[in-house]
């Protein structure tokens, strides 16, 4: 995570511009230590205003997953695919999708994943460990 | 605050409606008023929930409903809280009546989505989540609850058979409910053979898209000296919220809004959990019922998955849960579901529940969730 001193970015458009044009995952770190990849004006955990803009690494481990056979509207030509909650290595969580995952046996909680700098929309991740043993 | 009752409640059969939501809402409203013995003219306010009214090209539907009920002069407003819309409306009605601002308030919730295809209906539902940070990353509502089920399974060992037991139980109850969308029992084998929607959730883990309407009449005790039916005393009406996105919450296996709303409700009511005799909880997906029973405080974390399989939560079990069939079998017309839970409590406490009547119906709890737990209502009811 690249920490900056600027106040957090207070526009969803800037987040989306970051994904699509700058290949950058924007987020914020709160004074309480909470890291979020979701837009907000105040920290949803502590309620304070001291949010600092951060660029998130996009690297982490799967905290929860599902393989969607029935897709979301924008993913109608991609099913089945995985929707994942990713625990980022710097803390905080982000969500995204992994194409080509046909069943839950192909993915596991704890798997290492990384953002592939793609936004279609949909933050696309790729699997970096193929088994729980690889994941350490 | 003054003592406040649900004096009447009614719903139609959930499923597919030929008529518009506005027509169905007016019909169930009149039936609920008749059950209460309250003329429309006595209403001081109507509160309407119709989250996806735009799917019928209709907003600001309250005045139309009031006009149909012969009370165009009565004020009305709409409450939207995703799947907890009409329980949020009930909370507002309670505040108005208990606080002395109205003698009688009508709550009506209705939804009609059956004219849309599955993809369109799924997309409407998805707007209740965070469109930018969840839905556009690939999540549907089944997908979001599937991540909860996946994390719950990892943490507590929850099995597909335990999820299936919830579906089997609620279908067994729905089979006895003439209001239910699905009035057929299913076996565990049928459940396990059903197609995967979002792993680990199968088709039979998911509530259906339903049309439907339900209405509740809320009155001050002093305004109704001779109620036409046995009223439900609203012992507590509590609401709580949580971070909108599941992934930003501390826990992926628990809904803190449920915990906080339940704690507030029990504290305000002065009721212990062991006094509650049956529950209607938000089971939009089977995992939701399991998590609800843990967060409401009836089972320790990780222990509720066994309750469906061992019969504890069956209609004749120690703690009947969703005797109506729940959202799972009775159906889930988004804005009608919270009010319909109260209809079930009303029918149970008035011995109108037929073959699904629970053994003891003196104290009951309803639990209604908006989206994935960012909104929650808990109500406690008792007989006089």
Image (cartoon, grey):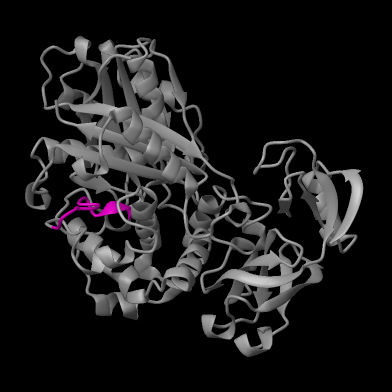
Q: Is residue B126 visible?
A: yes
The image quadrant that residue A71 belongs to is bottom right
Would residue B4 appear left or right of B101 to someone viewing this image? left
Task: Establish if A76 lies above or below A8.
Answer: below
Q: Main secondary structure of the magenta part?
A: loop
Q: Residue at x 34, y 32 (%)?
A: B267
Is residue B210 toward the left or the right of residue A91 in the image?
Answer: left
Left or right placement of residue B148 versus residue B358 in this view: right
Q: Is residue B132 above or below residue B6?
A: below
Query: What residue lies at 39% left-to-right and 57% top-to-bottom?
Result: B291
Q: Position of residue B309 (x, y in %)?
A: 24, 69
Q: Position of residue B249 (x, y in %)?
A: 59, 52
Q: Quadrant of the C terminus of chain A?
A: bottom right
Residue B113, above or below B31: below
Residue A76 visible here? no
Asked if residue A121 is among those painted magenta in the image, a careful observer would answer no
How far across and how far down the image is residue B136, in percent? 66, 58
Give the residues drawn in magenta, as a range. Answer: B317-327
Q: Taking B312 as reference, is B100 left or right?
A: right
Q: Quadrant of residue B6?
A: top left
User: For residue A41, what is the image quadrant?
Assistant: top right
Q: Nearer the viewer, residue B270 or B117?
A: B270
Image quadrant containing the N terminus of chain A: bottom right
Image coordinates of residue B103 in percent, x first then y, are 29, 11
Q: Residue at x 47, y 30 (%)?
A: B79
Q: Is residue B323 magenta?
A: yes
């Amino acid at each position: 995570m690249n920490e900056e001193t600027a106040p957090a970015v207070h526009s969803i458009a800037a987040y989306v511009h970051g994904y699509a044009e700058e290949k950058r995952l924007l987020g914020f770190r709160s004074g309480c230590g909470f890291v979020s990849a979701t837009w907000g004006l105040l920290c949803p955990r502590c309620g304070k205003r001291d949010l600092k803009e951060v660029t998130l690494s996009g690297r982490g481990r799967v905290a929860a997953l599902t393989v969607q056979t029935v897709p979301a509207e924008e993913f109608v030509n991609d099913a089945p695919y995985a929707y994942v909650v990713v625990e980022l290595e710097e803390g905080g969580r982000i969500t995204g999708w992994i194409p080509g995952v046909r069943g839950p046996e192909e993915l596991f909680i704890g798997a290492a994943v990384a953002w592939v700098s793609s936004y279609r929309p949909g933050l696309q991740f790729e699997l970096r460990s193929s088994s729980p043993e690889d994941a350490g | 605050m003054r003592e406040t009752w649900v004096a009447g409640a009614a719903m139609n059969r959930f499923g597919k409606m030929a008529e518009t939501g506005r027509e169905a809402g007016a019909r169930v409203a009149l039936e609920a008023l008749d059950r209460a013995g309250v003329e429309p003219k006595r209403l001081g306010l109507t509160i309407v929930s119709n989250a996806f009214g735009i799917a019928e090209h209709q907003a600001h539907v309250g005045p139309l409903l009031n006009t149909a009920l012969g009370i165009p002069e009565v004020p009305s407003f709409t409450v939207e809280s995703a799947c907890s819309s009409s329980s949020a409306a009930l909370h507002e009605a309670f505040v108005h009546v208990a606080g002395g601002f109205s003698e009688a308030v009508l709550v009506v919730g209705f939804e009609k989505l059956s004219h849309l295809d599955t993809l369109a209906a799924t997309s409407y539902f998805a707007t209740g989540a965070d469109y930018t940070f969840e839905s556009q990353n690939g999540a549907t509502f089944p997908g979001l609850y599937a991540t909860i089920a996946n994390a719950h399974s990892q943490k507590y060992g929850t099995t597909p058979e335990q999820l299936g037991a919830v579906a089997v139980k609620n279908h067994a109850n729905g089979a006895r409910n003439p209001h239910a969308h699905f009035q057929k029992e299913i076996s565990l084998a049928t459940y396990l053979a059903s197609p995967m929607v979002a792993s680990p959730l199968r088709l039979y883990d998911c509530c259906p898209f339903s049309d439907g309407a339900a209405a509740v009449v809320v009155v001050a005790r002093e305004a109704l000296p001779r109620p036409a039916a046995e009223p439900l005393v609203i012992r507590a009406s509590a609401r709580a919220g949580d971070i909108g996105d599941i992934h930003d919450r501390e826990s992926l296996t628990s809904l803190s809004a449920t915990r906080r709303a339940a704690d507030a409700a029990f504290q305000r009511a002065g009721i212990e959990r062991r006094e509650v005799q049956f529950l209607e909880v938000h089971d939009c997906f089977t995992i939701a019922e399991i998590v609800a029973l843990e967060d409401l405080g009836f089972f320790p974390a990780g222990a509720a998955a066994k309750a469906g399989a061992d019969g504890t939560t069956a209609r004749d079990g120690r703690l009947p849960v969703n005797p109506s069939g729940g959202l799972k079998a009775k159906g889930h017309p988004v804005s009608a579901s919270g009010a319909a839970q109260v209809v079930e409590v009303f029918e149970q406490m008035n011995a109108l529940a037929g073959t699904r009547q629970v053994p003891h119906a003196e104290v009951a709890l309803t639990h209604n969730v908006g989206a994935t737990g960012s909104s929650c209502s808990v109500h406690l009811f008792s007989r006089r």
